[in-house]
Amino acid sequence: MADDQNPLLIKRYASRRLYNTETSDYVTLEDIAGFIRGGREVKIVDLKSGDDLTRQYLLQIIAEHESRGESVLPTNVLNDLVRSYTTTATSAVPQFLAVSFEMFRDSQSKWMENMNKANPMSGVPGFEAIQAQQEAFLKAMTGGMSGAWSGPSKDDADAPAKDTKSGSSTDDLDAIRTQLAELQKKLSKLDK
């Protein structure tokens, strides 16, 4: 059984072929991209020298996806990355990117949690289909990365929201329920 906590070790032979040390077979860049999308960290080393080639191959995977029209990086971001190699900001860029992606992963997790919580809209016909489409869209946009949108924290979600106009979340919830019931009546009349 593979140890998912340790990076998957891939060795590059002199022939430039990549060898998966866990399964004892050769892999392609697309295979490596699949491991990463599945949540696995990889480490690619040169068999002879022991040099770490991980960054080189990850950049190659990104370049191949971008060249096939699977653009994730806007041109202005690529320009900024190129500029960062020639400025004194070079030392701050890696930390900024790492923190930004960590926040993105965390917010994705929270968004998925919020989507799965009880929702007053769940009684609306077709809501489940809409929710499934949203989840599929999010998964497609993020390449299956775990995480979610940065919605309210668990403490905020558990506390009843107060509307400053009505002063009570119960009044708002009752109004929403009434509107949903009316909407359901209208929809059922349309089905007949």
Image (cartoon, helix red, strand yellow):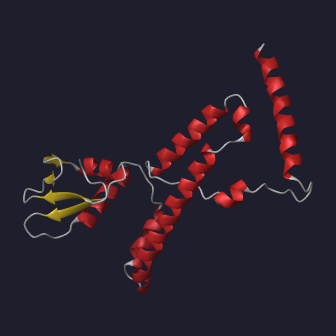
In the rendered image, is residue 152 in sight?
no
Q: Nearer the viewer, residue 83 or 138?
A: 138
Total labels drawn: 0
- Outermost residue toward the right? 166
Q: Name the image quarter holding residue 4.
A: bottom left
Point 37% across, 50% down: residue: 37
Give left or right: position of 81 versus 18: right
- Outermost residue toward the top? 192
Image coords of residue 39 (percent x, y):
37, 53
Q: Name the image quarter holding residue 159.
A: bottom right
Image coords of residue 119 (percent x, y):
70, 42
Give left or right: position of 2 versus 97: left
Q: Is residue 99 above or below residue 174?
A: below
Give left or right: position of 87 versus 8: right
Q: Nearer the viewer, residue 83 or 152?
A: 152
Point 92% across, 54% down: residue: 166
Give left or right: position of 54 versus 21: right
- Outermost residue toward the bottom? 88
Q: Is residue 23 above or below residue 102?
A: above
Q: Nearer the viewer, residue 33 or 115?
A: 115
Q: Is residue 96 above or below residue 116?
A: below
Image coords of residue 59 (percent x, y):
31, 62
Point 12% across, 57% down: residue: 16
Image coords of residue 156 (percent x, y):
70, 59
In the rendered image, is residue 134 in sight?
yes
